Amino acid sequence: MSQPTLEDLHDDHTPKAIAARLQESSSLNYLGDFILGAVDGTVTTFAIVAGVAGANLSGGVMIAIILGLANVLADGFSMAVSNYLKARADRHVLDNFRRLEESHIESIPEGEREEIRQIFAAKGFEGHVLDEIVRVITNDRKQWVDTMLTEEWGLQLETPCPFRAGLTTFLGFICAGMIPLSPLFFGGVLGPDWTFLASAIAAMASFFIIGAIRGFITRHPLFLSGMETLLIGSGAAVLAYGVGITLGGLVPP
């Protein structure tokens, strides 16, 4: 990505722009969950297609469609459930530590005030300024607890909705996982060789686009991020193809 000009930096640091950016950064974003599902959906589905092609099975296109669809639904659901459970666990951890800090503030408020004092003293505050920071924070119970959660335990105050996180991952897996399968539905027109080639091209394009989107989100160079994901996905496909070739002779014609 190109470096911003001095004029761009000034525009990004007006009071209005700063307020908007801080509001955006504090809001939850589920695009990462979509990318997670999309990458895995493309990799695992095309790995199945590549494995079937490598095995050179009779009726390979139809077998690849059946296995691919089964993978899209089953593995996509599995990933969605895993992400759902992770989001629920993150929320439970936050709730547990919030109750813990509430209990500590109720039982030993002076000890908790001293923790706030030491946290901000370590940041370089001292004297009257430090006293005022401690007073302001500890006068607001919610702010007090939130500060302990972020500063002492390193927790995020906002956690994703488990259902939305799981659903977004599932949709990403389904959408991307269907891309390598799409050419297989035209196998009767293209023929097996051209069908698997078209599937490979579609998967490679999907890998690159997903990687570029990931680069945009993480503010990394789009081309390099796209190529990184493309190489990782291609590696999985080569492994699956190699396994198919190795084991294909074990399957009776």
Image (cartoon, rainbow, N blue to C red):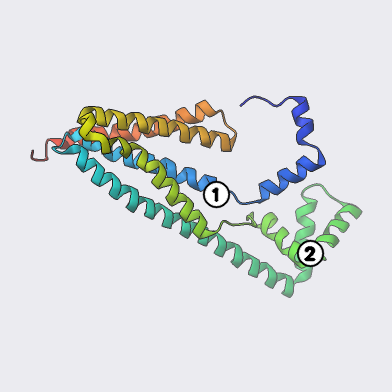
The secondary element bearing badge 1 is classed as: loop
Q: In the rendering, at what x and y percent does residue 94 appear? A: 60, 62
In the displayed orientation, state which residue is furthest to the left.
252
115 sits to left or right of 64 = right
Q: Is residue 117 above or below residue 122?
A: below
Q: CA distance from mark 1 to mark 2?
A: 36 Å
Q: In the rendering, at what x and y percent does residue 211 appear? A: 48, 34
Q: Residues within 10 Å of mark 1 (few under 14, many from 20)?
A: some
Name the residue carrying label 2: 113
Q: In the rendering, at what x and y percent does residue 147 appear? A: 72, 58
- In this view, the residue in front, 110 or 182, is 182
In the displayed orientation, state which residue is furthest to the bottom.
107
Name the residue carrying label 1: 30
Q: Quadrant of the N terminus?
A: top right
Q: Quadrant of residue 144?
A: bottom right
Q: Residues within 10 Å of mark 2 (few under 14, many from 20)?
A: some
The secondary element bearing badge 2 is classed as: helix
Q: Amino acid at mark 2?
A: Arg
Residue drawn at x 39%, y 47% is 174
Which-is-in-front pick, marks 1 and 2?
A: 1
Q: Amino acid at mark 1?
A: Tyr
